[in-house]
Image (tube, rainbow, N blue to C red):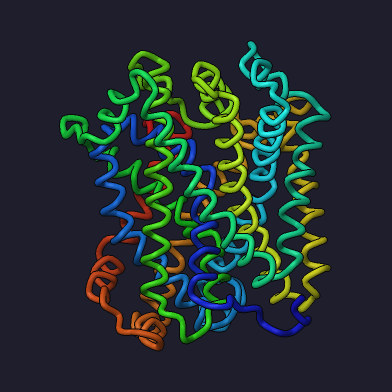
Amino acid sequence: METKNKRSTFSGQLGYVMAVAGSAVGLGNIWRFPYLAAKYGGGIFLLTYFILAVTFGFALLISETALGRKTKKSPIAAYKKLGAKKLQIGGWLNAIVPMLIVPYYCVVGGWVCKYLFEYIKNNSTNLVSNNYFSNFSSSSIQPVFWLIVFAILVFVVVLLGVEKGVEKCSKILMPALIIMAIFIAGYTLFTPGAIEGAKYYLIPDFSRFSIMTVVAAMGQMFYSLSIGMGILFTYGSYMKKEIDMERSITQVEIMDTIVAFLAGLMIVPAVFAFSNGDPNTLNAGPSLMFITLPNVFNSMALGNIIGIVFFLLVLFAALTSAISLMECCVSIIQDRFDLSRKKCCTIILAGILILGIPCSLGFGVLDFIKPLGLSILDFFDFMTNSIMMPISAICTCLLIIKVTGFKTVINEVEISSKFKRKKAYLFCMKYIVVPGLIIILLSSILSTIGIISI
């Protein structure tokens, strides 16, 4: 375990890549990416997402990681060290976001644990009974119990430290996750009617391309890559100077895109076949994961085994992201108050339970609490994803443009390697990223209040 004042580090490039990729690959890849890909024309959405990831996404990944490695600090301390007096709100938002996300993320992680447990018990027939998910999620005891189980799993990994906990866990879970995704995708393609679904998912439908395709792909890419939530600052601060930053970021982009692509390939064809070609069955959010897919698996040969593998995959994806979120919170508290890792982990675990339990009960005994007309969990999701994260990313851009200068980032990248995509980085940061972030912010707000649909 790290000493009180010693800065943690990843052992090398592989450890960093697996940890950041683990952060990037989460529940959003599994249930949101397939839904958006199906809604916005399949192949054309995939192409749009890929282009945005290697331009817009790359610029922000490099920026936050470079500033983290240069300062060797988590967001609040990094902003202070870089002299951003008028932009301190950016550091605070980067710090607050993971502290608000990890509690409700653990609620959903608990749901995943429950479903995996039921599949292991061979109770899949119960999972497809009418109103099973709504009855479970609205009860008072079981969701809280599984929230605690999931939170303790995350707590134990983070308590072990960066190299022995976060890195080691990511090195095991990420390859396992990809292998399972390939297995399920391959299996579902042999389901009767799945090939038509695969064509729908893979072949671009240019007639369905619109500005909303770009907006939806940009929003998904932004959240999927963990931009604007402090994680990249924190993990960058753990990166050794000799690690090739540009190559590492490129590998993270590739791994995140592969998993998102595989998620679509294992879900869209199967649901498409199950629903006789109705793409509207691919509803975003919990209904896809906990209602539609169990019904799909129940209709397949070896459905119980596929259910076990699938929910194990989802559990791994949820764990790697939740571990990154909690690690970011721990780093922020350590930098701010110079406490031991054990004390920081205990504080964050307490915070997860204090905020997570009301989020869980918000579908049951506390469902009368409706801030902005949303459930407690959805409200936290809206405030972090739609408001705080875009604003924090905008602040990071302004920090570079107005305070540190592009040279600060470029010099940090070039410590370990030649910056091959420097021109593309500068072009994106000067002309694309800030307008894009403003579009994400406005479209997310307008979508939530029902003026537009994403």
The residue sitting at 63% across, 65% down in the picture is 168
The residue sitting at 29% across, 54% down in the picture is 52
* Number of on-image labels: 0
Q: Is residue 135 left or right of residue 30?
A: right
* Vertical position of residue 174 compared to residue 305: above or below: below
Image quadrant where one finds the C terminus = top left
Q: In which quarter of the view is residue 41 placed?
A: top left
* Vertical position of residue 134 compared to residue 25: above or below: above
Q: In this view, does 233 lie to the left or right of 118?
A: left
Image quadrant where one finds the N terminus = bottom right
Tell me residue 114's x, y (percent). Answer: 71, 33
The residue sitting at 69% across, 37% down in the picture is 113
* Vertical position of residue 273 compared to residue 115: above or below: above
Q: In this view, does 234 lie to the left or right of 436?
A: right
Q: In this view, does 130 lie to the left or right of 340?
A: left
Q: In terms of depth relative to the viewer, which is nearer, 195 or 409?
A: 195
Q: In which quarter of the view is residue 92 placed?
A: bottom right
Q: In terms of depth relative to the viewer, which is nearer, 375 or 87?
A: 375
Tell me residue 196's x, y (percent). Answer: 28, 23
Tell me residue 108's x, y (percent). Answer: 65, 38
Q: Given the current orientation, which residue lies at the most extreme left position?
A: 207
Tell me residue 2's x, y (percent). Answer: 74, 78
Q: Given the current orientation, which residue lies at the most extreme top position?
A: 130
The residue sitting at 25% across, 29% down in the picture is 199
